Image (tube, grey):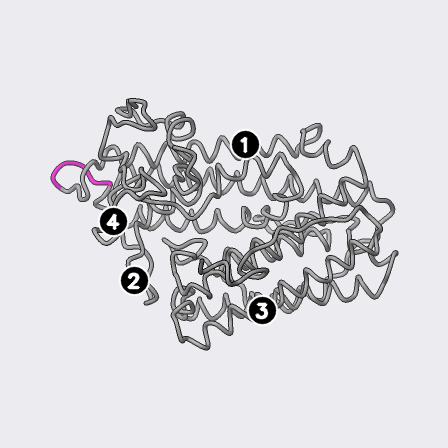
Amino acid sequence: MRTTMTAVLALAAATPALAQSKGEVLATYADIAAAAYEDSLITARALDAAIQRLIAEPSAQTLQAAREAWLRARVPYQQTEVYRFGNPIVDDWEGKVNAWPLDEGLIDYVDASYGGATDQNRYAALNVIANPTFSLSGEDIDATEITPALLENELHEADAVEANVATGYHAIEFLLWGQDLNGTDAGAGERPWTDYATGEDCTGGNCDRRGDYLQAASDLLVSDLEWMVGQWAEGGAAREAVLSDEDAGLVAILTGMGSLSYGEQAGERMKLGVMLNDPEEEHDCFSDNTHNSHFYDGMGIRNVYFGEYVRADGSVVSGPSLSSLVAEADPQVDAALREDLNQTMIELGQLKTAAEAGFSYDRMLERGNEAGEALIMDAVNALVEQTRSIERAVAALGVDQIGFEGSDSLDNPNAVFQ
């Protein structure tokens, strides 16, 4: 999980393979997707095995092992997020596995300070784990058996409320760590292992149902990733959609890069939290892993431009790159974008290093913490600058005009407080 600044700086030395055709560049893009989703699946299966051990033999050790497996699983998955915005198949699916933030009271017990149902979400404190039957949108739900189908078909985004996240990495994260009640002080969630114990050792109540929910969420994550791996395999629908139309394929790459870089990461995931000074805006808020999520999101953008991905086993998937196409069209644009991508990784690496040294991301968000705000905003500014270079790459390649995802935090800051 640790990445030294030496390793980050070494990224700048990479040289992309020379492109022979748009089709070869798109094939590299699809090959990287296939490898990164396969790594996500491999690590999700390892997480599932750790969860099974936790449920079968609850202890501080098995809980910690499951948490560590979750952290490892995030590394390859975050590098796939660059595929989201330009590929409808991925975008339509992504909410099942990485939706955030979530109203965790839908799933399990929460601290009294959390509150209850709101006008925006009547089910914010439903606590499915404690209630085997309940009414949802006027329908009586039998949840005596907690299954993947219940989570996916009945609970996820229940009542059409996006905060009712019942599946995916963050539901699992909450069940492993519990709420982070430290505010902008140091510390992650502190769910005790006894929340999965049996008999009189059980804390939090309903330990058997909590284990059932965790297992169902894990099973669903694995099956969802299996499906996505198939989409990028030879003959898969996502791969074929990219390869069948070269110009549309380039639009997909550039849209994913620009939208993740600007509106999603720089805006919604980073600047918004700084503006609100709210640790609930952390992407991995229960585990205090947000610094890594930001770092590997940035790495994913860089991967697809440089045409190179380092797999979880250390092997490398590489080939003709988008960088080489841009260099053929305008060498100065390519050089500037390569420099900007490397600078972004340096800024994200500094944020990551500071967090790993004890200056946690939630502490950085504290109002008046100038050092924390500077670390985050330096990365935000680098992401914004690299987006401008991506826009110049779009122009250099002469592809259709592309609209990147925006964010009020960047485009209309006053709206954030309305």
Front disc: 1 or 3? 3
Q: Which quadrant of the figure has residue 387?
A: bottom right
- Give the magenta part as a residue range: 196-200
In this view, 217 is above or below 356: above
Say which residue label 1 marks. Answer: 226
Q: Amino acid at mark 3?
A: Glu
Tell me the element at label 1: helix
- Few, some or many residues within 10 Å of mark 2 (<14, 14–19, 20+): some
Is 336 inside the magenta-drawn segment? no
Identify the residue position indicated by label 4 in the image: 115
Q: Point out the frontmost of discs 4 and 3.
A: 4
Label at residue 347: 3
Residue type pointed to by label 1: Glu
Question: Which residue is pictured at 60% across the width and 51% down the height?
Answer: 314
Secondary structure found at label 3: helix
Q: Earlier in the sequence, mark 2 or mark 3?
A: 2
